[in-house]
Amino acid sequence: MALRELSSLEKYLGLKKPNKYSTQGDKKVPVLQNNNGPPLVGLGTIASHLVKEAKRPNLLGDSAESRAVVQQWLEYRVTKLDGCTKEDTKAILKDLNLYLQDKVYMAGNQFTLADTFMYFGIHPIIVDLSVQEKEQYVNVARWFDHIQRCPGVRHHLPPLVVLRNRIYTSKHH
Amino acid sequence: MTKDEVQGAMEEDQAQSKKGLKKQQKEAEKAVKKAEKQAKLAADQQGSEEDDFAKDRYGVPPMVQSQQKLDRVLVRVEDLSPEKADQLIWLRARVHTSRAKGKQCFLVLRQQQFNVQALVAVGDRASKQMVKFAANITKESIVDVEASVRKVEQKIESCTQQDVELHIERIFVISQSEARLPLQLEDAVRPDGEGEEEGRATVNQDTKLDNRVIDLRTTTSQAIFRLQSGVCKLFRDTLTNKGFVEIQTPKIISAASEGGANVFTVSYFKTSAYLAQSPQLYKQMCICADFDKVFCVGPVFRAEDSNTHRHLTEFVGLDIEMAFSYHYHEVIDSITDTMVQIFKGLRDNFQTEILTVNKQYPSEPFKFLEPTLRLEYTEALAMLHQAGVEMGDEEDLSTPNEKLLGRLVKEKYDTDFYVLDKYPLAVRPFYTMPDPNNAKYSNSYDMFMRGEEILSGAQRVHDAQLLTERAMHHQIDLEKIKSYIDSFRYGAPPTWRRRHWPGESVHAVPRPPQHSSDLHVPT
């Protein structure tokens, strides 16, 4: 799963030569063998490295604050989102919905790695939501639809339908 | 005493006599006090008998045994309005609540859906004892009240008659209720949400159904049954005006009409018979007998094991059957027009009832279009695909998809009522007429209200040969339906049939199957 994400990221970044990854441990943490130094371990680490390689540092955030936020969400993705249980998803969606109330992107005012990897990570949850639930977490749905339509992001994942208009308007049904 | 003791032995004699004196004095005082008290009590008693000048204006009269014919007009609570201000009227109602407050007693008197505030105050018309009597009348007792109608400055929010109150001159208890009621009517009409929020009681369904007589007295129940009555009346009136004839069909029949799966068997003398699952066969016989247009209102019995508000073992079915000239849409138009007349009739003549029900079960006003919206199945499929639902072209709609489709249609066309036409042939019964232009589809349809299917209809195959072919295609034993096929051999007009689910209303009330034999409430 993580490997497919990394190869999608490579395609997005326009890196010509795809890298060879291996995994370690039960959780299949991705590992990148580096010619120059020690191997890079971990989704966030490798992603940051790839971004630097592709000379697109703005994807990691353009200010110190947004850089910190990007790293925060990368870590959130790996620790909280991957392998979360059914009960956790409701809490996660609620938190995200609140966080995204007044933000277009996860970090700062532009598209960053945080958006990419949160999108990859949350896709399996959104796939299972009903139309009514997507309306309930309206900010998450709005952000999700925005990111999945960004050119070049959505390589290995199918597009999900997010309705533009609310159909569950009255509170009585 | 102590002082005497301190004074010493020398004055013992003196002390003795002083003690004695004091004791005597004390006893004398006690006696005086007792005498006073007794005198007061006697005076009080005399006083209470004397002071009850209103003795004949309240009480429990002898049981009504048709002793006399009173020429008295009893006014209805719903007619109490400022127009009647200062009139002295009689009325009979139930005591909904009674509350004493010092020299006054406030009562709420209830009659079916309506209630009004009434008051007994100590004054020249009412005595203290009368007010006390009024305060002690048990809830749900039936009382006869003579009162003057008074306009009020501030609207009484908690009653239906908000502009007036009654000032009671006479009050008699005609039928007393036991002090402890199995459920409180105020709790029974409380909306579920409000109950949870404010920590107040609501009555759960089992309690309501075990004490159905009291539960039916609530304003909500009264309104619901009036709406149900209204639906049946509008159905009958509209169809009669269109030239339909009402028929009553047999309910004890010799063979299961819709397939043996969910039919009730009854013992019929030495053999058995079945309770009719629908009036289908008889309606069609009427058409073949040149009745042209018939309808039928009556019970339908289905041994449905499911526990939802749409699966009742016994419900009232509103069935229509009519012959048409050239196209089955003639029938759809006739039916949708009937439905629209029913909606309009309820909207225009039953607003009071609808609002009463809404207090306990809030809902939005029911929306419909004129002419009624008719969608084709293919369009519905497209809408569902657009919303991310994966469904095959010839697949039937599942209940969740029906509900979602209802929402999408509401959002796109702003209507709660629509017709879905041209269902796939594969999912309809063998006697459904195929679409002449596309063999995958059929001349059949369903109608939906707020995303729930309330009606299913189709053009029936009226040609014996085609019927046989379709039956064989569905692998049905031809022997079992021989008489049905035969009925078409003697010139059968093209017919349409539709079965309508239990009376529609503008809200939903849950009904568990095991209690449905009792009474039923519209869904």
Image: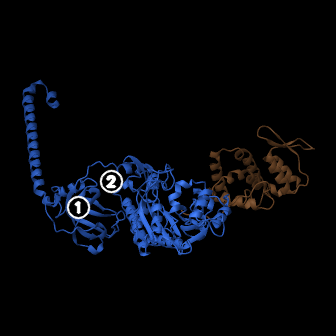
Chain colours: A brown, B blue
| Mark count | 2
Q: Secondary structure at mark 2?
A: helix
- Observer-nearest of B492 and B504: B492
Q: Quadrant of residue A131?
A: bottom right
The answer to which of B66 and B155 lies nearer the viewer is B66
Specify few, some or many for label 2: CA neighbours under 10 Å numbering under 14, 14-19, or 20 or more: few
Please give left or right for residue B473 compared with residue B309 in the image: right
Q: Which residue is mark 2?
A: B213
How far across and how far down the image is residue A31, in percent?
A: 84, 43
Vertical arrangement, residue B41 with respect to residue B163, above or below? above
* Rendering coords of residue B74 (x, y %): 23, 67
Q: Are marks 2 and 1 on the same chain?
A: yes
Q: Of the residues tagged 2 and 1, which is closer to the observer?
A: 2
Q: Secondary structure at mark 1?
A: strand
Q: Position of residue A71 (x, y in %)?
A: 77, 50
Q: Residues within 10 Å of mark 1 (few under 14, many from 20)?
A: many
